[in-house]
Image (cartoon, grey):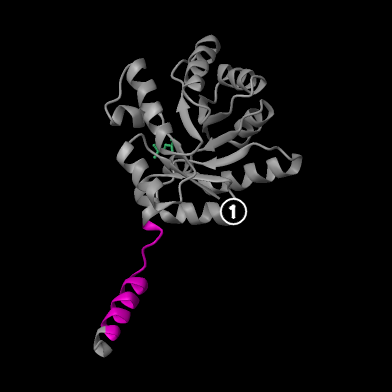
Amino acid sequence: MDFFIDTANIDEIKEAHAIGVLNGVTTNPSLMAKEGIKGKVEVLKHYEAICKIVEDKVSAEVISTDYVGMVKEGTQLAEISEKIVIKVPMTLDGVKAISYFTSKGIRTNCTLIFTAGQALLAAKAGATYVSPFIGRLDDIAYDGLELIKQIITIFDNYGYSTEVLAASIRHTMHLIKCAEIGADVATSPLKVIISLLNHPLTDNGLAKFLADYKKVEP
Ligand code: G3P
Protein backbone atom coordinates (compact mmCIF):
# COMPACT_ATOMS: atom_id res chain seq x y z
CA MET A 1 0.00 0.00 0.00
CA ASP A 2 1.34 3.42 -0.95
CA PHE A 3 1.62 6.00 1.83
CA PHE A 4 0.65 9.55 0.94
CA ILE A 5 0.71 12.46 3.38
CA ASP A 6 -2.44 14.57 3.59
CA THR A 7 -1.10 18.07 4.18
CA ALA A 8 0.17 21.23 2.52
CA ASN A 9 2.70 21.82 5.30
CA ILE A 10 6.21 21.82 3.81
CA ASP A 11 7.96 20.81 7.07
CA GLU A 12 5.64 17.83 7.55
CA ILE A 13 6.16 16.72 3.94
CA LYS A 14 9.96 16.99 4.41
CA GLU A 15 9.74 15.03 7.68
CA ALA A 16 7.66 12.23 6.16
CA HIS A 17 9.94 12.11 3.12
CA ALA A 18 13.03 11.88 5.34
CA ILE A 19 11.61 8.75 7.01
CA GLY A 20 11.75 7.09 3.59
CA VAL A 21 8.21 5.75 3.48
CA LEU A 22 6.47 8.49 1.51
CA ASN A 23 5.00 7.76 -1.92
CA GLY A 24 3.05 10.96 -2.53
CA VAL A 25 1.15 13.99 -1.22
CA THR A 26 -2.50 14.99 -1.21
CA THR A 27 -3.66 18.52 -0.57
CA ASN A 28 -7.00 20.27 -0.72
CA PRO A 29 -8.14 23.92 -0.54
CA SER A 30 -8.75 23.62 3.24
CA LEU A 31 -5.21 22.32 3.82
CA MET A 32 -3.75 25.09 1.61
CA ALA A 33 -5.75 27.72 3.55
CA LYS A 34 -4.44 26.26 6.83
CA GLU A 35 -0.92 27.09 5.63
CA GLY A 36 -2.02 30.63 4.70
CA ILE A 37 -1.51 29.99 0.96
CA LYS A 38 -3.81 32.26 -1.01
CA GLY A 39 -4.16 33.43 -4.60
CA LYS A 40 -3.19 31.65 -7.80
CA VAL A 41 0.48 32.71 -7.80
CA GLU A 42 1.10 31.54 -4.22
CA VAL A 43 -0.76 28.29 -4.84
CA LEU A 44 1.29 27.46 -7.96
CA LYS A 45 4.55 28.29 -6.13
CA HIS A 46 3.54 26.11 -3.20
CA TYR A 47 2.89 23.11 -5.47
CA GLU A 48 6.27 23.75 -7.10
CA ALA A 49 7.91 23.61 -3.67
CA ILE A 50 6.12 20.35 -2.79
CA CYS A 51 7.18 18.79 -6.10
CA LYS A 52 10.82 19.58 -5.28
CA ILE A 53 10.60 17.42 -2.14
CA VAL A 54 8.82 14.27 -3.30
CA GLU A 55 9.54 11.90 -6.19
CA ASP A 56 6.00 11.74 -7.63
CA LYS A 57 2.22 11.83 -7.13
CA VAL A 58 1.33 15.28 -5.82
CA SER A 59 -2.44 15.84 -5.87
CA ALA A 60 -3.31 19.46 -6.68
CA GLU A 61 -7.00 20.30 -6.39
CA VAL A 62 -8.89 22.56 -8.79
CA ILE A 63 -11.20 25.10 -7.22
CA SER A 64 -13.24 25.78 -10.36
CA THR A 65 -16.63 24.10 -10.39
CA ASP A 66 -17.41 24.29 -14.13
CA TYR A 67 -15.91 22.04 -16.80
CA VAL A 68 -14.14 24.81 -18.76
CA GLY A 69 -12.66 26.29 -15.58
CA MET A 70 -11.52 22.87 -14.31
CA VAL A 71 -9.81 22.08 -17.62
CA LYS A 72 -8.07 25.46 -17.71
CA GLU A 73 -6.99 25.32 -14.08
CA GLY A 74 -5.96 21.64 -14.20
CA THR A 75 -3.93 22.17 -17.37
CA GLN A 76 -2.04 25.00 -15.67
CA LEU A 77 -1.43 22.87 -12.57
CA ALA A 78 -0.21 19.96 -14.72
CA GLU A 79 2.32 22.27 -16.36
CA ILE A 80 4.09 22.77 -12.99
CA SER A 81 5.52 19.25 -13.05
CA GLU A 82 4.86 15.74 -14.34
CA LYS A 83 4.51 14.79 -10.66
CA ILE A 84 1.19 16.63 -10.42
CA VAL A 85 -2.06 14.64 -10.28
CA ILE A 86 -5.15 16.81 -10.86
CA LYS A 87 -7.63 16.48 -8.04
CA VAL A 88 -11.18 16.97 -9.28
CA PRO A 89 -14.42 16.88 -7.26
CA MET A 90 -17.12 14.26 -7.86
CA THR A 91 -19.57 16.37 -9.84
CA LEU A 92 -20.92 16.04 -13.39
CA ASP A 93 -18.46 18.67 -14.63
CA GLY A 94 -15.75 16.96 -12.59
CA VAL A 95 -16.37 13.61 -14.32
CA LYS A 96 -16.28 15.35 -17.71
CA ALA A 97 -12.99 17.01 -16.73
CA ILE A 98 -11.57 13.61 -15.67
CA SER A 99 -12.49 12.21 -19.11
CA TYR A 100 -10.73 15.18 -20.74
CA PHE A 101 -7.56 14.86 -18.63
CA THR A 102 -7.53 11.09 -19.24
CA SER A 103 -7.62 11.69 -23.01
CA LYS A 104 -4.62 14.01 -22.61
CA GLY A 105 -2.65 11.50 -20.51
CA ILE A 106 -2.92 13.67 -17.38
CA ARG A 107 -3.43 11.75 -14.12
CA THR A 108 -6.44 12.55 -11.95
CA ASN A 109 -7.66 11.98 -8.42
CA CYS A 110 -11.45 12.12 -8.03
CA THR A 111 -12.14 13.52 -4.58
CA LEU A 112 -15.18 13.69 -2.28
CA ILE A 113 -16.22 10.08 -2.96
CA PHE A 114 -18.89 8.84 -0.53
CA THR A 115 -20.57 6.02 -2.51
CA ALA A 116 -19.48 3.07 -4.65
CA GLY A 117 -21.53 4.48 -7.53
CA GLN A 118 -19.50 7.67 -7.51
CA ALA A 119 -16.28 5.62 -7.54
CA LEU A 120 -17.56 3.54 -10.48
CA LEU A 121 -18.40 6.66 -12.48
CA ALA A 122 -14.95 8.14 -11.85
CA ALA A 123 -13.27 4.86 -12.82
CA LYS A 124 -15.27 4.70 -16.06
CA ALA A 125 -14.07 8.23 -16.87
CA GLY A 126 -10.51 6.97 -16.42
CA ALA A 127 -9.57 8.47 -13.04
CA THR A 128 -6.13 7.40 -11.84
CA TYR A 129 -7.35 7.50 -8.23
CA VAL A 130 -10.66 7.70 -6.41
CA SER A 131 -10.62 9.18 -2.91
CA PRO A 132 -13.32 7.79 -0.61
CA PHE A 133 -13.46 9.80 2.66
CA ILE A 134 -13.50 7.22 5.46
CA GLY A 135 -13.46 9.53 8.50
CA ARG A 136 -16.21 11.81 7.26
CA LEU A 137 -18.47 8.78 6.65
CA ASP A 138 -17.71 7.43 10.13
CA ASP A 139 -18.59 10.90 11.49
CA ILE A 140 -22.15 10.50 10.19
CA ALA A 141 -22.45 6.88 11.41
CA TYR A 142 -21.72 5.17 8.08
CA ASP A 143 -18.97 2.55 7.83
CA GLY A 144 -16.17 4.21 5.83
CA LEU A 145 -14.06 1.04 5.68
CA GLU A 146 -17.04 -0.91 4.27
CA LEU A 147 -17.09 1.56 1.36
CA ILE A 148 -13.40 0.85 0.66
CA LYS A 149 -14.19 -2.90 0.53
CA GLN A 150 -17.16 -2.33 -1.80
CA ILE A 151 -15.15 -0.19 -4.24
CA ILE A 152 -12.27 -2.69 -4.32
CA THR A 153 -14.72 -5.52 -5.10
CA ILE A 154 -16.28 -3.55 -7.96
CA PHE A 155 -12.93 -2.52 -9.45
CA ASP A 156 -11.66 -6.12 -9.17
CA ASN A 157 -14.82 -7.47 -10.85
CA TYR A 158 -14.08 -5.51 -14.00
CA GLY A 159 -10.31 -5.04 -13.82
CA TYR A 160 -10.38 -1.24 -13.50
CA SER A 161 -6.87 0.14 -13.14
CA THR A 162 -8.17 3.09 -11.05
CA GLU A 163 -6.51 2.98 -7.63
CA VAL A 164 -8.46 3.22 -4.39
CA LEU A 165 -6.94 6.06 -2.35
CA ALA A 166 -8.39 5.94 1.15
CA ALA A 167 -8.70 9.52 2.43
CA SER A 168 -9.97 11.27 5.56
CA ILE A 169 -7.95 8.86 7.70
CA ARG A 170 -8.10 9.81 11.36
CA HIS A 171 -6.16 7.12 13.26
CA THR A 172 -3.87 4.12 12.92
CA MET A 173 -6.71 1.57 12.92
CA HIS A 174 -8.08 3.21 9.76
CA LEU A 175 -4.63 2.85 8.17
CA ILE A 176 -4.11 -0.77 9.27
CA LYS A 177 -7.61 -1.81 8.20
CA CYS A 178 -7.09 -0.16 4.79
CA ALA A 179 -3.94 -2.25 4.33
CA GLU A 180 -5.83 -5.38 5.44
CA ILE A 181 -8.68 -4.70 3.02
CA GLY A 182 -6.26 -3.97 0.19
CA ALA A 183 -6.60 -0.22 -0.50
CA ASP A 184 -3.96 0.80 -3.05
CA VAL A 185 -3.10 4.02 -1.21
CA ALA A 186 -3.84 5.62 2.15
CA THR A 187 -3.38 9.33 2.65
CA SER A 188 -2.91 10.34 6.28
CA PRO A 189 -1.76 13.21 8.47
CA LEU A 190 1.90 12.88 9.59
CA LYS A 191 0.87 12.09 13.17
CA VAL A 192 -1.07 9.00 12.02
CA ILE A 193 1.89 7.70 9.98
CA ILE A 194 4.28 8.21 12.91
CA SER A 195 1.79 6.71 15.41
CA LEU A 196 2.14 3.37 13.58
CA LEU A 197 5.43 2.83 15.38
CA ASN A 198 4.01 3.23 18.90
CA HIS A 199 3.72 0.32 21.29
CA PRO A 200 4.48 0.36 25.04
CA LEU A 201 6.08 -3.11 24.84
CA THR A 202 8.52 -1.77 22.25
CA ASP A 203 9.47 1.14 24.56
CA ASN A 204 9.72 -1.12 27.62
CA GLY A 205 11.64 -3.77 25.68
CA LEU A 206 14.18 -1.25 24.42
CA ALA A 207 14.62 0.25 27.90
CA LYS A 208 15.29 -3.27 29.28
CA PHE A 209 17.77 -4.13 26.50
CA LEU A 210 19.73 -0.95 27.20
CA ALA A 211 19.64 -1.46 30.99
CA ASP A 212 20.83 -5.08 30.63
CA TYR A 213 23.63 -4.00 28.28
CA LYS A 214 24.82 -1.43 30.84
CA LYS A 215 25.01 -4.14 33.55
CA VAL A 216 27.75 -6.04 31.69
CA GLU A 217 29.46 -3.04 30.11
CA PRO A 218 33.16 -3.01 31.09
O1 G3P B 1 -7.73 15.37 1.52
C1 G3P B 1 -9.01 14.90 1.72
C2 G3P B 1 -9.28 14.25 3.06
O2 G3P B 1 -8.21 13.42 3.43
C3 G3P B 1 -9.77 15.16 4.13
O3 G3P B 1 -9.72 14.59 5.40
O4 G3P B 1 -9.84 14.80 7.87
O5 G3P B 1 -10.66 16.69 6.42
O6 G3P B 1 -11.94 14.57 6.60
P1 G3P B 1 -10.60 15.21 6.63
Instruction: Give residue 215's position: percent from left, percent from top.
Output: 25, 88
Q: Image point 29% across, 79% down: which residue? A: 210
Describe the element under mark 1 as helix, strand or loop.
helix
Residue 128, quarter of picture:
top right
Q: Amino acid at mark 1?
A: Ile
Queried whether the magenta region covers residue 94, the answer comes back as no
Q: Is residue 137 above or below residue 195?
A: above
Q: Quadrant of the C terminus?
A: bottom left
Q: Nearer the viewer, residue 173 or 33?
A: 33
Q: Is residue 120 left or right of residue 109?
A: right
Q: Nearer the viewer, residue 131 or 37?
A: 37
Q: Nearer the viewer, residue 9 or 34?
A: 9
Q: Is residue 74 left or right of residue 157?
A: left
Instruction: Give residue 145's position: percent from left, percent from top.
Output: 53, 48
Q: Image point 68% across, 46% down: which residue? A: 153
| Residue that label 1 marks | 181
Q: Residues within 10 Å of mark 1 (few under 14, many from 20)?
A: some
Q: Is residue 175 left or right of residue 218?
A: right
Determine the main secondary structure of the stretch shown in magenta.
helix
Q: Which residues are magenta?
A: 195-213
